[in-house]
Image (cartoon, rainbow, N blue to C red):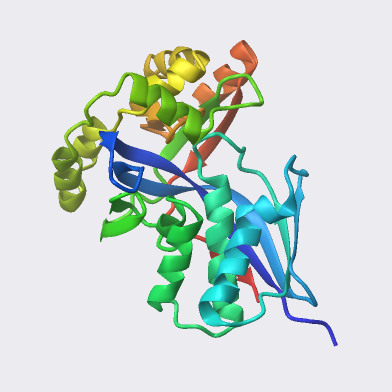
Amino acid sequence: MARPFLLISAPAKINLYLGVHPGKEEDGYHRVDTVMTTIDLTDTVEIAPADELFVRVTPAQDFPMEQNTAYRAARAMGDAFGRQANFTILIDKHIPVRAGLGGPSTDAAAVILGIAHLWDLDPLDPRIEQVAQGIGADVPFFLHGSIAWLAQRGDTLQELFAPLTATPVALVRPPGEAGVTSQEAYAAFDKNPTAPADLGQMLQALRAHDEASIMQAVANNLAPAAAEVLPSIAQVLSWMRAQPGVRAADVCGSGSTVFAICKTQRDAEAMVSAAQNEHGWWAKVAKMEKTGPVILHG
């Protein structure tokens, strides 16, 4: 008899607002406010019961399985609920890594939600949120997926907002496989910190569901630090902001991907085509989503 399995779609994210506060707290981390939304660029995660925990990623990654966020999430679920987290987890990667799009975090959230489903757990059990926080700052966001404001280390949900479902987005990543790690971006930020933009403006616009004001409030004070690590980020951002039909553009998280929210799908497609054909940059068309990981089968 075939064992049951889950097939989960795990979406990427963009930061509509990222505000890193200068100076570190007593725990050694920065205070961070962030507003994120999911987009329809996705990884696919398959989870099936097994005799031991095993994670395989395609394309293969250049670090041990035990360091993968999906592996760590499964282990943490087992520890939190006193069970053996014996699963085979297969991840088909489409979200580039070190790109600011939350790929490792959404994979971890998919595993957490998938195991909760297989174990018939209450998704509102506070231990699930605690597991997510222990894996990484963006993981709790993906448990919810709609537009959300998170505070403290950027890992504590404060408020959910009505989604901007199907709003077109262009994603462009400058050349270079290495990308930018969050550690590199934060190190550069600490050398030359800048104050975050006005969070209240973004929250007021989201509460009113005022799209024009939301676009005006898009901001990321970590972007200059990311561009210091990888200067081509600034080139891409400047180019995207000058393209037709752009409502707002900024850096995704700590980089290296830059996003532009566009007036129409045609505007997004034209920008992506130009990025690919004229500059040879990695580029994708996407749309804003309204949820985090979704179980497609099982």
On the question of residue 1 being in view, the answer is yes
Residue 98 image point, x, y percent: 57, 35
279 or 142, which lies in front? 142
Give the quarter of the figure containing the C terminus: bottom right
Side (left or right) of 220 relative to 121: left
Q: Is residue 242 above or below residue 6?
A: above
Give the quarter of the figure containing the N terminus: bottom right
The residue that appears at 83% across and 82% down in the rendered structure is 2
The residue that appears at 43% across and 27% down in the rendered structure is 187
The residue that appears at 77% across and 73% down in the rendered structure is 52
Q: Is residue 264 above or below residue 58?
A: above
Residue 150 image point, x, y percent: 30, 52
2 or 242, which lies in front? 2
Side (left or right) of 91 relative to 285: right
Residue 253 image point, x, y percent: 42, 36
Residue at the front extreme of this rendering: 26
Residue at the bottom extreme of this rendering: 1
255 or 228, which lies in front? 228
